[in-house]
Image (cartoon, rainbow, N blue to C red):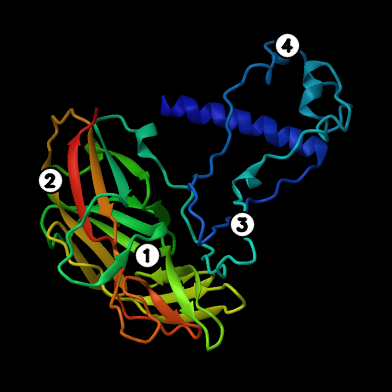
Amino acid sequence: MKTRLRLARILGIAVVLALAACSGSDTGNAGDTTDAFVAADVVPAEVAGTDAAEGVVGADMAEESAPADIATDTPFAEVAGEVVPADVATDAPPADVDALAADTGLDETAPIDTAPETPVATDVTNEAEVAEGPTLEFVIVGDPDSDVTFQDSYASQTPAAFFIGVQKVQLLASADDPSPVTVFDAGDGKYTEVDMQGSTSLATIDLFQVTSGTYIYARVLMATARFTVQATVHPPFPVPALQGPVSVVAALGDTVIDSTPRSQDWVQYSFSAGGFPFVKTGTLPPFPSSATGTVIKESGRTWLQMELSEHLTITPSISMNYVATVTMKTKNCFRWEDQSTSSYATGVFDTDSSGSSEPVKSFGPGDYSIVIAAAE
């Protein structure tokens, strides 16, 4: 079945290329625009295919030989016995691949746009389309609503427009498995942004392609984070305090953000309102500790490793489809230490107009877990 689909697509592509050759039209590349401060659904790019092979080659084509004087650049349409005017394809609009470009228009009070030109992997293969046997789907869910118990007394708020860039997902037979099985890989220098206010299916693999054994852990390689929080900014007297969103962009591992290489733990805070913008860079605070997962930082990488709720045993006779769901709880996960500075309010994230803020103590998901269950 996979072969037939590929042949149909090849025939369909051949027709499109032939028509394009007749018309001389060009097709542009889609831009990748990401708004760091506005939550948006990340939609993977899809290439429209066709399996309409009929009509391309007539049944009687082989019965007549082409006259010797037919020009070598004769359009395919003439094979059917009817000459298509040279401009037949000029009215056909090019493939609308730019339709995915986000509307990034912001009003003048919006924060400075520090959104990375994210090297998001838009060509992630969903192996469910070609899997022959039982499958494992890997899903990441952001949960900003469920309560989390923190072991500190810091002030907090729930971030908005929260996205985490995921580079890789692996299964492990032990906590220090030297040969983990890769479930998802966005590719070197790439990552897929996962919405921490929704559900994202990263990949589906064929379990027959996985080495037999029992898998106990899964881990997620995180590349970036970006979100917004509300703050009160205090300009020099007599200008009154200003309330507005602060945008946060961070490198959880060595990566590229906005076409610039960034080292692990780099973070940038941006604010713009009332004519008092500021941009401040610093060092990331740690992820909160959790009883259900461990953050492992090593060699410029940040892994989130969790034990599977049900250990996954793969045998040659396995016949069931599974879904592994990673849940990241983000309620009140942006946490800071209130200061007693004059005019600073308790429970409010305060900063001055130079970007010197109350100390941020943690920002990552406050709790995370992974559940594996039979697919419905």
Q: CA distance from mark 3 to mark 2?
A: 40 Å
Q: Is residue 220 above or below residue 273?
A: above
Residue 104 - label: 3
Q: CA distance from mark 4 to mark 3?
A: 57 Å
Q: Disc 3 marks which amino acid?
A: Thr
User: Tag 3: Cα neighbours inside 10 Å, few (<14), some, or many (≥20)?
Assistant: few
In the structure shown, which secondary structural element does the residue marked by tag 4 occupy?
helix
Q: Disc 2 marks which amino acid?
A: Ser
Badge nearest the viewer, 2 or 4: 2
Judge left or right: residue 282 versus residue 309.
right
Badge nearest the viewer, 4 or 1: 1
Judge left or right: residue 71 versus residue 178.
right
In the structure shown, which secondary structural element does the residue marked by tag 1 occupy?
strand
In the structure shown, which secondary structural element does the residue marked by tag 3 occupy?
loop
| Residue beneath disc 2 | 309
- Residue drawn at 48 percent across, 27 percent down: 5
Quadrant of the rendered structure where residue 31 is?
bottom right
Tell which of 322 and 84 is nearer to you.
322
Q: CA distance from mark 2 to mark 4?
A: 66 Å
User: Tag 4: Cα neighbours inside 10 Å, few (<14), some, or many (≥20)?
Assistant: few
Instruction: Point out the tag, 1 or 2, that comes first from the N-terminus.
Output: 1
| Residue beneath disc 1 | 223
Tell which of 277 and 293 is nearer to you.
277
